Image: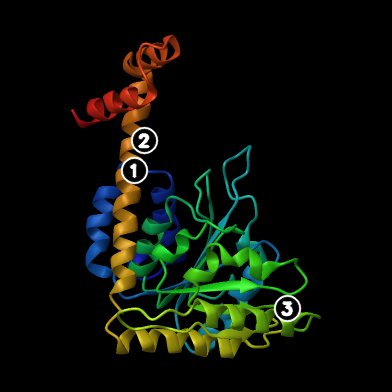
């Protein structure tokens, strides 16, 4: 545990593996880690496949390390249908940081979890926080319009788009647009970048509403992550958002959201385990037979399952 708090990569990796595997030791580990958390800043990066999330994440790591900030990366990838592991290894794609002791990179498999993240992501964030990371970058699976779970975990959410990938701004309308704190138009050296930026700015202006409390207008940053162009501007935009949150007394909102998400993930995992245990007993098969026979509706059957789990 002491080695993990000092940021020893092997020890941190072992703790995250225990989290992913649902180890019986998790309660003990969580109690030991709790006093050492609450310091890290979490930045979520999301967007459609192919916009350059991994390249942007790698470029951000370089920029943050140049500022002597300790960085953790949780790169969430689709699961292999055969092994259940991460289908794409971001540690390979971010190989330039592999020997840097100030960077910890971990690929996590979704294992069927929806929302663009892995179910174990909240607990993995806690491990990296306790390990002394100043900034934790969470890169989601390529998402669709409703897979915006990262906003519950991030202090700042970055939505990436790229020109020449169809009507990408329209695709963002139905969910991603509302969660972005910073927009990035990556691959901005391509034709159509100006049009994408203008359309985003127009949509942001239309989306602004007079509401009670402070209001943040998401900036639009142009980048060419492969060459590092615009990455310093992106870091500056992230820092401005953090300063705004501090000035408006909202700095604690991110940790509160993460705590809620973590509690919910733990509770749901426990419920799933108890329901699976019912599958091995006579209860759940008997209820299924009654539903098939028409003597019981599925809602009433679910109520009986919940009642059984409570006892």
Q: Which mark is residue 152?
A: none
Instruction: Establish if 305 lies above or below 109.
Output: above
Which residue is denoted by mark 2 in the rendering? Answer: 272
Instruction: Establish if 128 lies above or below 203.
Output: above
Is any part of residue 70 visible from this angle?
A: yes
Q: Give the mark nearest the N terminus, 2 or 3.
A: 3
Q: Pick out the residue farthest to the left.
A: 311
- Assign a secondary structure to mark 2: helix
In front of the other: 80 or 2: 80
- Assign a secondary structure to mark 3: loop
Which residue is denoted by mark 1 in the rendering? Answer: 268
Task: Using the numbered discs, state the Cα–Cα distance from disc 3 to disc 1 in whole angstroms.
Answer: 39 Å
Q: How is the image coloured?
A: rainbow
Decide if residue 79 is on the left or right side of residue 32.
right
Please provide percent x and percent y for residue 61. Answer: 55, 78
Please provide percent x and percent y for residue 222. Answer: 65, 85
Decide if residue 176 is on the left or right side of residue 69.
right
Please provide percent x and percent y for residue 310. Answer: 21, 31
Which residue is denoted by mark 3 in the rendering? Answer: 187
Verify CB contact (< 8 Å) between mark 2 and mark 1.
Answer: yes
Please provide percent x and percent y for residue 72. Answer: 47, 70
Task: Using the numbered discs, state the Cα–Cα distance from disc 2 to disc 1 in whole angstroms.
Answer: 6 Å
């Amino acid at each position: 545990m002491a080695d993990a708090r000092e940021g020893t990569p092997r020890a941190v990796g072992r703790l995250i593996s225990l989290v992913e595997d649902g180890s019986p030791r998790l309660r003990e580990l969580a109690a030991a880690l709790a006093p050492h958390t609450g310091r890290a800043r979490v930045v979520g990066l999301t967007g459609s496949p192919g916009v350059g999330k991994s390249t942007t994440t790698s470029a951000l790591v370089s920029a943050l390390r140049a500022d002597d900030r300790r960085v953790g990366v949780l790169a969430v990838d689709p699961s292999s249908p055969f092994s259940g592991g991460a289908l794409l290894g971001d540690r390979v794609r971010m190989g330039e940081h592999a020997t840097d002791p100030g960077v910890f990179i971990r690929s996590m498999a979704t294992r069927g979890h929806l929302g663009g993240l892995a179910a174990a992501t909240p607990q993995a964030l806690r491990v990296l926080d306790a390990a002394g990371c100043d900034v934790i970058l969470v890169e989601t699976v390529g998402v669709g319009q409703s897979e915006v779970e990262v906003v519950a975990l991030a202090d700042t959410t970055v939505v990436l788009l790229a020109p020449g990938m169809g009507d990408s701004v329209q695709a963002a309308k139905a969910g991603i647009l509302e969660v972005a704190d910073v927009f990035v138009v990556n691959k901005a050296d391509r034709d159509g970048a100006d049009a994408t930026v203008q359309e985003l700015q127009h949509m942001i202006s239309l989306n602004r509403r007079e509401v009670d409390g402070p209001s943040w207008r998401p900036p639009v940053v142009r980048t060419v992550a492969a060459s590092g162009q615009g990455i310093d501007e992106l870091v500056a935009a992230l820092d401005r958002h953090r300063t705004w949150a501090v000035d408006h007394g909202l700095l604690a909102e991110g940790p509160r959201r993460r705590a809620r998400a973590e509690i919910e993930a733990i509770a749901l995992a426990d419920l799933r385990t108890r329901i699976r245990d019912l599958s091995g007993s006579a209860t759940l098969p008997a209820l299924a037979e009654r539903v098939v026979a028409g003597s019981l509706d599925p809602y009433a059957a679910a109520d009986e399952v919940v009642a059984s789990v409570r006892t």
